[in-house]
Each structure stands twice: as C-alpha cells, then as structure tokens.
C-alpha cells in the first residue's frame, strides 16, 4: 500500500501545492506545464477537436467512390484508417490526462488526495499503454506509400495492426475511465456514465487465410469492420466525454 503521508519525498510545486512522489503516480508532471490552460479547459479543447480527429466512415460511400475512381479513392481511405486512429489516441490521451489532473487538484482542494492516491496511481498505469502507442510507428503517409507499392501486403499487415491497436487502446482507456468515474464520484462530481464494453480480439490469422482462400473477396467485409468498429468506438467515447463535461461544469 502506498505511503500517503506528506513525508520528505513529497514536493512543493510552484502553485503552492504539495504533490506525492512522481514515481508513485505520474499525475503531478502536467502541473508544471508552461501552457497557462486549466485542466478543465484542456478537457474542453480535447472534446472540441474530436470532429477533426475522430473521422467517421460511411462504408458504402467509400466503396462507391473507390469503384467510380477505379481504386484511386481507396488510397485516401487507407490513409484515413491510419490517420484517425493515431490522432484519436493522441486526443484521448490528452483528454484523460487533463481529466486526471483536474481530479487530482480537486482532491487536494478537498483534502482527500491521500485517500485517493492509490486510484490515481492506477489511472497512471492504465494511461501508460496509450502513451506507448503514441510513440509507435503508425505514420499514415508512410503506410499509404506502402499501400501504393504493395497493396495486398500493406492491406493485410495494416489491418492486423489497426485491429490490435483498437483493442489495446480500448482496453487501456476503458480501465482509465472506470477509475476516473469512481474518483469523480468520490469527489462529488458523478459522471452519470460507466465505461462501455470494448472490442474483442479478432482471429486475424483466420481472416488472412480466408482473404487468400476467397481471392481477396473477404477484404470487402474486413474493410466494413475496419470502418464500422472505430466509428462505434468513437461514439461511445463521446458519450463518456459529454458526461465528463457535464460533471466538470464550471470547474475551470
């Protein structure tokens, strides 16, 4: 169990507040950010960016334009599949970190940071996989070039990676949301929403095999999943984000 006393390892930040050892919970670091934007404002800014980052596909529209353009539009589709997942993960990491920081500052104001320190540590641990994902090589331009050079190989490898990313991202953010939901409840700011079930792993080896056995026809269904599943994921995330904004209220 974490030592929650304000011992010699605690440190005083420039805002006049005491924070626990950074090695215990990666919560304090944003408090020293040179950007003068409050955590609640950061949450609002992150939510405001979702129309730009969380691109929603219409499968039949994308398929129609791909056929009409003799496959040219398919290059844009492949680019967007990678771009939206990378930028969605970056935006969600920023939002959850800001929500975590707001809760930490509120817990300090209420004098209950010691009781909640374990939960903040848990949130920090759940956010680590998302931080790792932001550093992975998923550059949409590079993958689009790969797609142009070797369409079939790039499509199969790209789909396997994107599917795994969605599952890993969904699990990490859902676990973080669960802890934050409980923290906000204990702070008197109930979200009125609970994290939703995340996507399950697909049998991608089976999918690759079926793609070859059907001479590529299965890719039509796989494309449908690669567009639709993130679409549903985004909408579920938006529900939690809206609940968070309501809970924050004038918390800026």
Image (cartoon, rainbow, N blue to C red):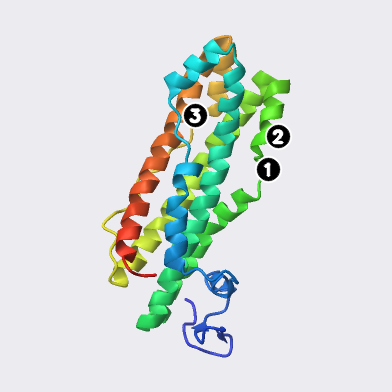
Q: Secondary structure at mark 3?
A: helix
Q: Is residue 119 visible?
A: no
Query: In front: mark 3 or mark 2?
Result: 2
The residue lying at 67 percent from left, 22 percent from top is: 153
State if disc 2 and disc 1 touch (CB < 8 Å).
yes
Q: Quick one: label 3 or label 2, which is nearer the N terminus?
A: 2
* Quarter of the picture holding the C terminus: bottom left
The residue lying at 58 percent from left, 18 percent from top is: 209
Q: Residues within 10 Å of mark 2 (few under 14, many from 20)?
A: few
Question: Disc 2 marks which residue?
Answer: 142
**x, y (%) of residue 38?**
47, 69
Q: Is residue 128 visible?
A: yes
Report whether 45 appears left or right of 211: left
Question: Disc 3 marks which residue?
Answer: 226
Q: Residues within 10 Å of mark 1 (few under 14, many from 20)?
A: few
95 is higher (above) or lower (below) than 217: below
Give the numbered dot on residue 137: 1
Q: Quick one: label 1 or label 2, which is nearer the N terminus?
A: 1
The tally of labels here is 3
**x, y (%) of residue 34?**
60, 72
């Amino acid at each position: 169990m974490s030592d929650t006393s304000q011992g010699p390892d605690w440190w005083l930040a420039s805002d006049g507040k005491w924070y626990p050892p950074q090695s215990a919970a990666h919560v304090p670091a944003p408090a020293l950010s040179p950007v003068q934007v409050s955590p609640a404002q950061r949450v609002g800014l992150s939510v405001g960016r979702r129309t730009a980052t969380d691109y929603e596909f219409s499968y039949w529209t994308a398929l129609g334009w791909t056929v009409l353009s003799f496959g040219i539009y398919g290059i844009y589709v492949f680019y967007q599949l990678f771009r939206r997942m990378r930028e969605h993960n970056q935006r969600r990491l920023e939002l959850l970190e800001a929500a975590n920081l707001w809760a930490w500052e509120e817990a300090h104001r209420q004098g209950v940071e010691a009781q909640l320190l374990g939960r903040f540590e848990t949130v920090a641990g759940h956010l680590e996989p998302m931080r790792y994902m932001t550093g992975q090589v998923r550059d949409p331009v590079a993958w689009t070039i790969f797609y142009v050079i070797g369409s079939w190989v790039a499509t199969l490898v790209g789909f396997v990676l994107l599917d795994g990313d969605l599952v890993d991202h969904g699990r990490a953010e859902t676990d973080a949301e669960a802890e934050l939901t409980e923290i906000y409840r204990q702070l008197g700011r109930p979200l009125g929403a609970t994290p939703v079930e995340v996507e399950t792993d697909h049998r991608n080896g089976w999918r690759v095999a079926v793609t070859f056995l059907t001479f590529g026809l299965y890719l039509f269904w796989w494309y449908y999943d690669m567009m639709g599943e993130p679409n549903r994921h985004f909408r579920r995330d938006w529900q939690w984000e809206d609940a968070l904004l309501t809970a924050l209220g004038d918390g800026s």
